[in-house]
């Protein structure tokens, strides 16, 4: 990967998102199908991967006061416009909200699980007064691969010629952490300046809870009240408060956008805030902060590609908090060996944290994972690393991530099914 490819990858994957990305993807698929069909929406059928269903069923919808996949599908079908992409929920009007509630509550929206689908997958069929539209989103939260009207294909991404050249992400996965850090640090301040937008955006999201603009479930408020007495007012408790608050706000339907990373707003929070706040605490320059942010985002991409963006494990913890641990170690002046220690320490700490869907409770998972990131970095700076023989740890950071990916993709399939079964069996 060269610098231009790196910058392209960052620009495409560090983008604003309004609300949890799974309901957003469901809304996008429904919007694309409804737009193709034209006319007034009559009913919607959605077929989702197990992972999409699990991650979206309990999470708040930005700009809307109800929770549920049926509402997300109804909102998208009524918006019928995909131009805003991950910020599609910003197009909700009071009229659309009222109509969506009616559609979802009168049985016009049907959601099923496609057991053969994996990862990011949403298929929408929208029937209207003018016909039937179909849309499929796959392998990326805004990656529409097929659009049809009355069985006739309007758009198909699969018809594109496959290039023999590796994609930027494929090139990234062939690199060592040492080379990724060197590449991130080769960019200029002007080239990386756009990454600072994510710091401002995600701090604003944290302010929503910390400053009392939105109540959430009281998680951030409780931490603000008692965390200083228990842990003091140093960097780590301040980061934990703001990560928890930003995540609580995002997943409870806060009307502010999040800067995402690797396709997820929560991953953006866990990647950006610990890195940026550590840089500020250590008195780092703007350029040094940007280099650390770029490094964190790239490692987040790397780990997500190995673990899977939607799986049985919490990638926000395993990928994004581990990326923060690497970036924090870098900011503390760590060597490549010490960054490897930090990654190994995270591998032996938070690997296996399950993903039981997107919901406000993810704020607790992220704050705990970020606490582990700081612990792992501090230990690494003191030449303390878990032994490569410990559990799923490896001798290199690359081996650690490969083992994380193996655990996620091959080791926890039954876990994922049981998690969804438990969620569906509840009557609350």
Image (cartoon, grey):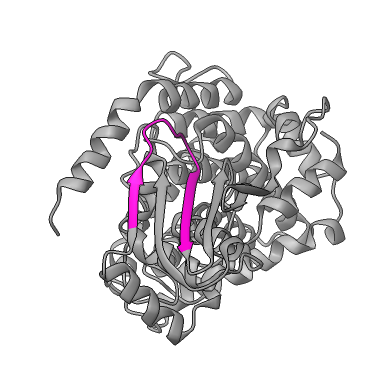
* Residue positioned 77% across, 44% down in the render: 184
Side of 304 where 51 appears, left or right: left
Q: Main secondary structure of the magenta part?
A: strand
Quick check: 105 above or below 12? below
Q: Nearer the viewer, residue 149 or 308?
A: 149
Side of 281 where 355 appears, left or right: left
* Viewer can see residue 241: no
Residues shaded magenta: 110-127
Q: Residue 338 at what x, y percent from top left? A: 60, 31
Q: Residue 386 at what x, y percent from top left? A: 45, 24
Q: Is residue 330 magenta?
A: no
| Quadrant in the picture for residue 272 | bottom right
Quick check: 287 above or below 204? above
Quick check: 311 above or below 93? above
**Residue lying furthest left:** 427
Quick check: 279 above or below 378? below
* Residue positioned 42% across, 28% down in the render: 408
* Viewer can see residue 32: yes
Q: Residue 215 at what x, y percent from top left? A: 32, 78
């Amino acid at each position: 990967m060269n610098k231009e490819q790196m910058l392209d990858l960052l620009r495409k994957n560090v983008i604003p998102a309004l609300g949890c990305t799974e309901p957003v993807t469901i809304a996008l698929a429904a919007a694309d199908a409804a737009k193709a069909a034209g006319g007034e929406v009559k009913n919607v059928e959605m077929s989702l991967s197990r992972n999409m269903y699990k991650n979206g069923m309990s999470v708040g919808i930005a700009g809307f006061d109800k929770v549920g996949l049926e509402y997300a599908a109804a909102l998208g079908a009524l918006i019928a416009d995909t131009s805003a992409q991950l910020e599609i929920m910003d197009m909700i009007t009071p009229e659309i909200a009222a109509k969506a509630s009616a559609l979802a509550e009168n049985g016009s929206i049907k959601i099923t699980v496609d057991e053969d689908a994996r990862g990011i997958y949403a298929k929408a069929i929208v029937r209207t007064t003018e016909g039937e539209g179909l849309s499929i989103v796959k392998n990326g939260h805004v990656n529409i691969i097929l659009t049809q009207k009355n069985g006739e294909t309007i758009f198909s991404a699969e018809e594109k010629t496959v290039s023999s050249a590796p994609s930027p992400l494929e090139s990234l996965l062939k690199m060592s952490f040492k080379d990724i850090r060197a590449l991130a640090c080769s960019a200029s301040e002007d080239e990386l300046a756009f990454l600072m937008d994510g710091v401002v955006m995600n701090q604003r999201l944290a302010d929503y809870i910390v400053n009392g603009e939105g109540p959430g479930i009281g998680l951030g408020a409780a931490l603000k009240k008692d965390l200083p007495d228990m842990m003091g007012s140093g960097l780590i408790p301040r980061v934990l408060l703001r990560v928890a608050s930003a995540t609580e706000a995002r997943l409870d339907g806060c009307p502010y956008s999040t800067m995402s990373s690797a396709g997820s707003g929560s991953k953006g929070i866990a990647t950006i805030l610990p890195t940026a706040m550590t840089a500020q605490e250590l008195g780092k320059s703007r350029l040094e902060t940007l280099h650390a942010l770029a490094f964190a985002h790239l490692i987040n991409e790397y780990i997500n590609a190995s673990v899977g963006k939607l799986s049985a494990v919490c990638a926000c913890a395993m990928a994004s908090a581990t990326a923060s641990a690497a970036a924090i170690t870098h900011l503390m002046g760590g060597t490549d060996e010490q960054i490897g220690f930090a990654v190994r320490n995270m591998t032996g700490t938070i690997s296996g944290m399950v993903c039981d869907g997107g919901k406000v409770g993810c704020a607790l998972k992220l704050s705990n994972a970020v606490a582990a990131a700081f612990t792992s970095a501090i230990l690494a700076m003191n030449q303390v690393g878990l032994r490569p023989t410990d559990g799923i740890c490896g001798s290199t950071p690359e081996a650690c991530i490969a083992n994380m990916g193996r655990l996620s993709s091959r080791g926890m399939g039954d876990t994922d099914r049981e998690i969804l079964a438990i969620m569906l069996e509840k009557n609350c």
